[in-house]
Amino acid sequence: MEVEIEIEIEVEGAETFLKTIYESIKEERGQEQEEGKGEVNTVLRDGLLYMSIGGSSDEIARLRAVVNTWLRLLKIAEDMVEVIASG
Protein backbone atom coordinates (compact mmCIF):
# COMPACT_ATOMS: atom_id res chain seq x y z
CA MET A 1 0.00 0.00 0.00
CA GLU A 2 1.41 3.36 -1.07
CA VAL A 3 1.34 6.08 1.61
CA GLU A 4 1.69 9.77 0.79
CA ILE A 5 2.72 12.51 3.20
CA GLU A 6 2.87 16.31 3.02
CA ILE A 7 4.08 18.44 5.93
CA GLU A 8 4.36 22.22 5.98
CA ILE A 9 6.47 24.13 8.49
CA GLU A 10 6.72 27.89 9.09
CA VAL A 11 9.63 29.39 11.02
CA GLU A 12 9.55 33.00 12.27
CA GLY A 13 12.53 35.13 13.14
CA ALA A 14 14.80 37.99 12.21
CA GLU A 15 15.64 38.20 8.51
CA THR A 16 19.35 37.44 9.00
CA PHE A 17 18.50 34.47 11.25
CA LEU A 18 16.09 33.00 8.69
CA LYS A 19 18.41 33.65 5.75
CA THR A 20 21.26 31.85 7.50
CA ILE A 21 19.06 28.83 8.21
CA TYR A 22 17.73 28.85 4.64
CA GLU A 23 21.24 28.97 3.17
CA SER A 24 22.47 26.17 5.42
CA ILE A 25 19.68 23.72 4.57
CA LYS A 26 19.31 24.44 0.85
CA GLU A 27 22.43 22.42 0.02
CA GLU A 28 20.99 19.40 1.80
CA ARG A 29 17.73 19.81 -0.08
CA GLY A 30 19.38 19.28 -3.45
CA GLN A 31 21.32 16.25 -2.25
CA GLU A 32 18.27 14.56 -0.73
CA GLN A 33 16.19 15.03 -3.87
CA GLU A 34 18.95 13.57 -6.05
CA GLU A 35 18.96 10.46 -3.86
CA GLY A 36 15.16 10.10 -4.10
CA LYS A 37 14.53 10.69 -0.40
CA GLY A 38 11.42 12.79 -0.72
CA GLU A 39 10.58 16.22 -2.00
CA VAL A 40 11.56 19.28 0.01
CA ASN A 41 10.81 22.86 -0.92
CA THR A 42 11.99 25.88 1.02
CA VAL A 43 10.94 29.48 0.51
CA LEU A 44 12.11 32.56 2.37
CA ARG A 45 9.42 35.26 2.12
CA ASP A 46 7.91 38.06 4.18
CA GLY A 47 9.89 37.35 7.34
CA LEU A 48 9.06 33.64 7.33
CA LEU A 49 10.86 30.50 6.26
CA TYR A 50 8.43 28.04 4.71
CA MET A 51 9.38 24.40 4.36
CA SER A 52 7.29 21.74 2.68
CA ILE A 53 8.27 18.08 3.04
CA GLY A 54 6.53 15.45 0.97
CA GLY A 55 6.88 12.03 -0.47
CA SER A 56 5.26 8.71 -1.04
CA SER A 57 6.39 5.19 -0.33
CA ASP A 58 5.04 1.79 0.52
CA GLU A 59 7.19 1.94 3.67
CA ILE A 60 5.89 4.25 6.40
CA ALA A 61 9.25 4.00 8.19
CA ARG A 62 10.97 5.55 5.17
CA LEU A 63 8.59 8.52 5.20
CA ARG A 64 9.05 8.97 8.94
CA ALA A 65 12.83 8.95 8.44
CA VAL A 66 12.59 11.66 5.76
CA VAL A 67 10.51 13.92 8.00
CA ASN A 68 12.70 13.29 11.06
CA THR A 69 15.85 14.03 9.07
CA TRP A 70 14.53 17.42 7.95
CA LEU A 71 13.25 18.35 11.38
CA ARG A 72 16.67 17.51 12.84
CA LEU A 73 18.49 19.52 10.14
CA LEU A 74 16.25 22.50 10.79
CA LYS A 75 16.83 22.27 14.55
CA ILE A 76 20.61 21.90 14.14
CA ALA A 77 20.75 24.92 11.81
CA GLU A 78 18.74 26.97 14.31
CA ASP A 79 20.96 25.89 17.22
CA MET A 80 24.16 26.71 15.31
CA VAL A 81 22.92 30.20 14.40
CA GLU A 82 22.13 30.84 18.08
CA VAL A 83 25.54 29.54 19.23
CA ILE A 84 27.37 31.75 16.74
CA ALA A 85 25.23 34.79 17.63
CA SER A 86 25.93 34.37 21.35
CA GLY A 87 29.66 34.40 20.62
Image: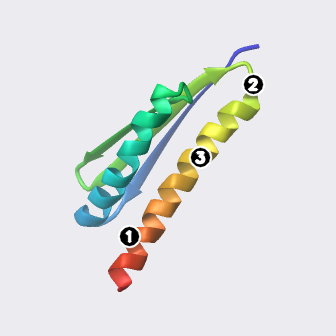
Residue type highlighted by circle 3? Thr
Q: Are marks 3 and 1 in contact (CB under 8 Å)?
A: no
Distance from disc 3 to disc 1, alpha carbons, whole Å, reads 18 Å
Q: Taking 76 as reference, is 3 above or below it?
A: above
Q: Residue at x 44, y 43 (%)?
A: 28
Element type at mark 1 = helix
Tag on residue 81? 1
Q: Is 84 in front, or is 19?
A: 84
Q: CA distance from mark 3 to mark 2?
A: 16 Å
56 sits to left or right of 10: right
Neighbor class of circle 3 (other Cα within 10 Å; few <14, some 14-19, many 20+) is: few
Point out residue 27 in the picture as x, y percentages from the top left corner. 37, 44
Query: Disc 2 designates what residue?
Result: 59
Q: Position of residue 26 (x, y in %)?
A: 36, 44
Q: Quadrant of residue 56 in the image? A: top right
Can you tell which mark lies on residue 48?
A: none
* Kind of residue sitting beneath label 2: Glu
Q: Which residue is mark 3?
A: 69
Q: Choose the circle earlier in sequence order: 3 or 1.
A: 3
Q: Residue sitting at 75 percent across and 34 percent down?
A: 61
The residue type indicated by label 1 comes to: Val
Q: Residues within 10 Å of mark 2 (few under 14, many from 20)?
A: few
